[in-house]
Image (tube, grey):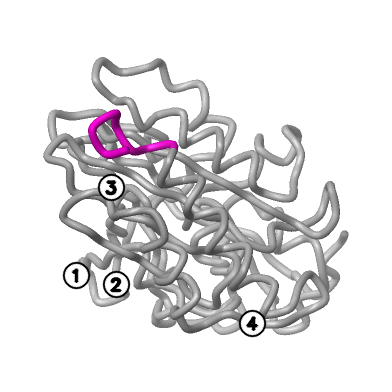
Amino acid sequence: MDVATITHYRRPADRGELTLASGEVLLGGGTWLFSEPQPDATGLADLTALGWPPLELSDAGLRIAGTCTIAELLPLPRQPGWTAQPLFRASAEALLTSFTIWRLATVGGNICRSFAAAAMISLAATLDGTALIWCPDGSDRTVPVAELPTGNGSNSLAPGEVLRAVELPVAALRSRTSLRRIALAELGRSGAVLTGRVDDDGSCLFTITAATLRPVLLRYPQVPAPGVLRAAAEAASGYYTDALGSADWRRQVSGLLLEEVRNDVAGPADG
């Protein structure tokens, strides 16, 4: 839709031009920004003008620019040993969107919008992703992506802060992973997204997203016995009720699906 309140648009040339004037908002892909009225927005500062490389590979892992689109993330060639790469597509497919939107929607935008069903948060949280944030005073700070959301559609970013990149460590990229998703409607928004990973040393992480207001992370030194994850899911807090599912339903399906995730990532010796 047209955002009728916008009176100016600019393309920052460097970090020094990211200071926002009153009424200005940052523009990435714009898929949410242009989906509903923005009565307080009078100007746009286009982050894509900064020309950040979408993906940067190194021995440390993968850096995903805040402006990297989902369509740019998915074709990354399979890297030797990165057994977690299929989780990229599985997470993208958990979004209520089409491949056309993938060409515009950015990883950073999905994370910064911070809806409970933000599947790029599911991806980054599962792989211990860290957010590199540019602060208005010129300093940087980092925070685990899983700790950014404060609620369904809210986060801890301060005014003027910019998500420069999400960094995924190579150890997590080498893990075995799995994802399960459920929605009340066949093509509806995710009511619960459950993920898990097992690292080379046997330690593991399981996450609950979409079903809870903030990501729930469950860490274990080894794959837990059957039933442990279901009990942990039932004891977790943050489940909520809306038109897409009740809190009780979300709690129950999370426990059931986490057990399926556990079975997927457990090795033969883990049973």
Residue count near mark 2 (Cα–Cα under 10 Å), binned few <14, some 14–19, many ≥20: some
Residue 22 among magenta residues = no
For disc 3, the marked residue is 167
For disc 4, the marked residue is 240
Element carrying mark 4: loop
Residue count near mark 4 (Cα–Cα under 10 Å), binned few <14, some 14–19, many ≥20: some
Element carrying mark 3: strand
Nearest-to-viewer mark from 4 and 3: 4
* Above or below, comparing residue 101 to residue 268 in the picture: below
In the image, residue 240 lies at what x, y percent? 64, 82
For disc 2, the marked residue is 135
In the image, residue 248 lies at what x, y percent? 67, 79
| Dominant secondary structure, magenta | helix
Residue count near mark 3 (Cα–Cα under 10 Å), binned few <14, some 14–19, many ≥20: many
What is the spatial separation of the Cα atoms under label 2 and label 3, in whole angstroms?
17 Å
Q: Are marks 2 and 1 in contact (CB under 8 Å)?
A: yes
For disc 1, the marked residue is 139
| Among numbered discs 2 and 4, the one appearing first in the sequence | 2
* Above or below, comparing residue 223 to residue 23 in the picture: above
Nearest-to-viewer mark from 2 and 3: 3
What is the spatial separation of the Cα atoms under label 2 and label 4, in whole angstroms?
32 Å
Residue 266 among magenta residues = yes
Amino acid type, mark 3: Glu
Amino acid type, mark 1: Ser
Side (left or right) of 125 relative to 114: left
